Image (spheres, helix red, strand yellow):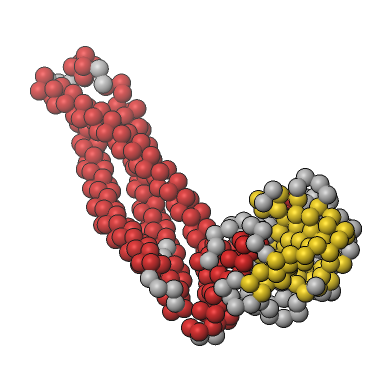
Amino acid sequence: MKKVLKAALTLLVFSSVLTFVFLKAGGQLIQAETETEKLERLTREISQYESEISKLKSQATTLSNLIAQYDAQIRLKIEQTEEKILLLGGRIDQLETSLQSLTDAFTNRVVYTYKMSKLNEPYLILISSPDLKTAFTSFHYLKKIESADRDLLVRLEKAQLTYEEEKVDQEALQKELESQKTVLGAQKAAKATLLEQTKNDEKKYQQLLSQARAEFEAIQAILAGKGDEEEVGKVSQGQRIASIIPGASCNSSGPHVHFIVSQNGATQNPFSFLRGIDYENCSGSSCGSNDGDPFNPGGSWDWPINPKVKFSQGYGSTWAVRNTWVGRIYSFHNGIDINSNSSQEVKAARSGTLYRGSYGGGGGCRLRYVRVDHDENDLDTFYLHINY
C-alpha cells in the first residue's frame, strides 16, 4: 500500500511540474497578446500611409507631390510585413517549445497511467488497502490523475492546432512579402526614372505631363476620324509608307512609332495580329527586366519596323500606367510603342489603302501619322510620330 501512495504522491508532484509548464505557456500567451497589440499598431500605420497616399493623389499634380507619393508607397508595407513575420516567428518558436514540453509531459503521464491502470478499479483498491480511509485516499488520487490526463490531452491538442495555424499565417505572410518586394522594386524604379527624366526640375515634369496629355488627346481625336487626311493610294504588305522621326517630335520626347490596330473604330491588341520577331523588352523598370509588359505576338502580319525591335510600352494596363506618372494621363494604352535598332523605315503591316494625316491639338503642334485602310474585316492600322 505504501508503494501505491508513493506512486500517487509522485504523480501529484509531477502534476505540479505540469502546472508550472502550463503557467509558463500562459505567460507566453500574455506575451502574445502584447505582440497582437504591436501588430494592431502596425496595421494602423499602414492605414495612415494609405490615407497619406490618397491625400497626396488628390492634391495638385507637382513633381514634389508625386515623389512624396512614391516615398509613401515605398514605406507602406515592407517593414511592417517583415516585422509581422519576425513577431510571428518568435511566437512559433515559443509554441514549438511549449508543444514539446507538453508532448514530453503527456508521454511520461501515459507511462505512469499505464503502470497504475491495474489499480484503477475500486474493488482492487479495497482489496490492496489496509483500511477504508487509505482506499478512499488512493481512489481520490487516481481520479485526480485521470482528470489531469484529460486536461493535458486537451491542452496538447489546442497547442498543436494553434501551432499549425501560426505556421500557415507565417507562410502566407512570406508570400505577401515577396509580392510586396516586387511592387517595391517597381516603385523605386518608377521614382528613379522620373528623377532621371526631369532632373528633379518641376518645369520639365510639367512639360512631360503636358506633352503626354496632348498626345493622348490627339490620338483619341485621330481614332475618331478628326485628323486631316489625304489618300495616297494602294500599298502592299511590307511596302515603305513612312520613317521614324529620329529625335523628339510633336507630343513625343523621343523616337518611336505608336502602332495602333483598329476594327470598326475600336482598338485591338496588336499582338493578336503581328508575328514573332527579335526584340528587346524595355517596357518595365529597365531594359531586360522581368517586370515589363508581355511581348506575345501570335498573328501572321509583318512588323511595321525592322528587327531588332525595341519595345517600350505594350497594350492595355501597362507597367508605365500602373507605376509611373503616365497613369495620371490615361489608364489604358491603346497601341504599342516600338522603335528599331537597325532602320528608321516604317512599312505597311498589311496591304490596303494608304492615307497621310495630321492633327493639331492643344500641344501647339501637328502630330503626323499615316493610316492604312485594309481590305479585310474593317481593319485599320495607324502609325504615329513619323515623317512622310
Q: Quadrant of residue 125?
A: top left
Q: Which residue appears at 67% of the width and 58% of the height?
A: 225
In-front residue for pair 374/345: 374
Q: Which residue appears at 27% of the width and 50% of the height?
A: 29
x%, y% of residue 316?
62, 56
Work out whether 374 lies above or below 232: above
x%, y% of residue 365?
64, 77
In-front residue for pair 366/207: 366
Q: Quadrant of residue 283?
A: bottom right
Q: Which residue appears at 80% of the width and 73% of the height?
A: 388
In this view of the protein, can residue 185 be seen by the observer? no
x%, y% of residue 23?
23, 48
In this view of the protein, can residue 111 be seen by the observer? yes
Position of the N terminus by quadrant: top left
Q: Quadrant of residue 190?
A: bottom right
Q: Residue furthest left?
A: 133
